């Protein structure tokens, strides 16, 4: 049975006690406007209502517990304890212009086994509930951090978690987090049913497709999911997404030295993305430096600068929009592909 979010539970409690509807709004204002993190301290509510919240949900608004925080320049990584004595990680990125972005986990571990990713070595332990997903952001909110944008690029494959769409509903609810859809990014390895549902239900949310090789046989070696959802099938779904939404689609591409960073790879990436119809200019490639960990293969190394520059040159010459992503947090294993969720 699908777990009920705390927000639905609070609405039900208000209704069960025949309280006026504004009590729900008061409770949400206490959480999101006054930063009150314990139900007992919501003294604007009647005591019996606070007691009912505590009996049902426990004393704290947030269901996950920070265990450890590591800080680096512009980056903070928090390890959370979740139910079942498991751990997940979330990352806060502080940009010099004052913008704060968050990289949030959707699963404890991941079952897809991409060979270059630390999270994949854990296997899938379980999906996070909608509350556990959104409570990562609630933790930062309670600690005084502005919630400017969020990317679901932490532990797990977001579109493999059926509760992800409930989390998006919570995040975009104007009475709750109030995120604009365009301030949210979902990253996927290419799960077609999830991409199609995103197009239908959250068309304005940003979509990133993790490609990492333009060749099906090699991509299947790097990312076994490619056997189920090959590149061309996913790109056809993304073409439909672009036609339906008029929005950019981002193509994530981790550069691995001597593996997928050759001239042939660059030309093949361009070949995949060019000539896809009137929306092909809305594909944007993000090249990502590889981040090694002690649990991923030693043979994977970062491409050198000249090779990255060559890759960029070829894509630009073929009319492909491309950016080399700035890396933050590699020193605390908070960068792309490094989240592992252990208590060190």
Image (tube, rainbow, N blue to C red):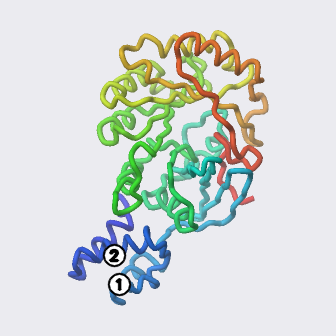
Q: Horizontal and vertical percent for residue 80? A: 61, 62
Compared across the picture, whether 45 is left or right of 98 comes to: left
Residue at 47% from the left image edge and 44% from the top image edge: 158
Above or below: residue 25 compared with residue 209? below
Give the residue displayed 68% in from the left and 19% down from the top.
261
Residue lying at 64% horizontally and 29% vertically, measured from the top left: 324
**Which of these two is toward me, 264 or 220?**
264
Relative vertical location of residue 36 with respect to residue 6 in this rendering, above or below: below
Within 10 Å of the Cα at label 1, are there few (<14), some (14-19), or many (20+) other Cα atoms?
Answer: some
The quadrant of the image that shows the N terminus is: bottom left
175 lies left or right of 113: left
Q: Position of residue 295 (x, y in %)?
A: 73, 42
Question: Residue at 43% across / 29% down in the picture?
Answer: 248
Label 1 SS: loop
| Circle 2 residues within 10 Å: few <14, some 14–19, many ≥20 | some
Q: Position of residue 232 (x, y in %)?
A: 44, 18
Mark 2 or mark 1: name the one nearer the start of the chain.
Answer: 2
Total marks shown come to: 2
Q: Quadrant of the C terminus?
A: bottom right
Which residue, as the protein is rendered here, is positioned at the far front?
Answer: 97
Q: Position of residue 343 (x, y in %)?
A: 71, 60
Q: Is residue 185 left or right of residue 278?
A: right
Q: CA distance from mark 2 to mark 1?
A: 8 Å
Give the quadrant of residue 259: top right
Tell me the tag on residue 26.
2
Occupied quadrant, residue 247: top left
Residue nearer the viewer, 176 or 301: 176
Report which residue position mark 1 lands on.
45
């Amino acid at each position: 049975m699908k777990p009920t979010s705390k927000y639905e539970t609070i609405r039900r409690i208000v209704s069960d006690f025949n309280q006026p509807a504004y009590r729900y709004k008061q409770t949400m204002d206490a959480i999101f406007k006054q930063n009150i993190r314990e139900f007992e301290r919501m003294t604007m509510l009647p005591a019996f209502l606070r007691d009912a919240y505590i009996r049902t949900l426990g004393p704290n608004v947030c269901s996950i517990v920070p265990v450890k925080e590591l800080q680096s320049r512009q980056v903070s990584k928090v390890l959370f304890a979740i139910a079942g004595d498991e751990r997940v990680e979330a990352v806060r990125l502080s940009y010099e212009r004052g913008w704060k972005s968050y990289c949030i986990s959707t699963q404890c571990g991941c079952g897809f086994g991409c060979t270059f990713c630390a999270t994949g070595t854990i296997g899938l332990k379980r999906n996070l509930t909608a509350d556990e997903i959104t409570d990562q952001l609630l933790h930062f909110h309670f600690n005084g951090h502005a919630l400017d944008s969020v990317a679901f690029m932490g532990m797990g494959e977001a579109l493999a978690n059926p509760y992800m769409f409930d989390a998006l509903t919570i995040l975009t609810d104007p009475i709750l987090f109030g995120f604009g859809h365009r301030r949210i990014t979902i990253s996927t390895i290419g799960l077609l049913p999830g991409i199609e549902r995103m197009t239908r239900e959250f068309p304005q949310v940003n979509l990133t497709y993790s490609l990492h090789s333009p060749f099906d046989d090699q991509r299947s070696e790097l990312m076994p999911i490619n056997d189920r959802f090959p590149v061309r099938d996913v790109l056809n779904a993304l073409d439909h997404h672009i036609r339906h939404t008029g929005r950019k689609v981002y193509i994530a591409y981790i550069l691995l030295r001597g593996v997928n960073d050759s001239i042939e790879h660059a030309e093949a990436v361009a070949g995949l993305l060019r000539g896809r119809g009137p929306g092909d200019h809305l594909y944007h490639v993000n090249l990502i430096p590889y981040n090694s960990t002690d649990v991923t293969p030693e043979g994977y190394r970062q491409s050198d600068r000249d090779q990255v520059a060559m890759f960029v040159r070829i894509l630009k010459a073929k009319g492909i929009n491309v950016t080399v992503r700035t890396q933050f947090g590699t020193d605390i294993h908070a960068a792309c592909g490094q989240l592992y969720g252990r208590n060190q």
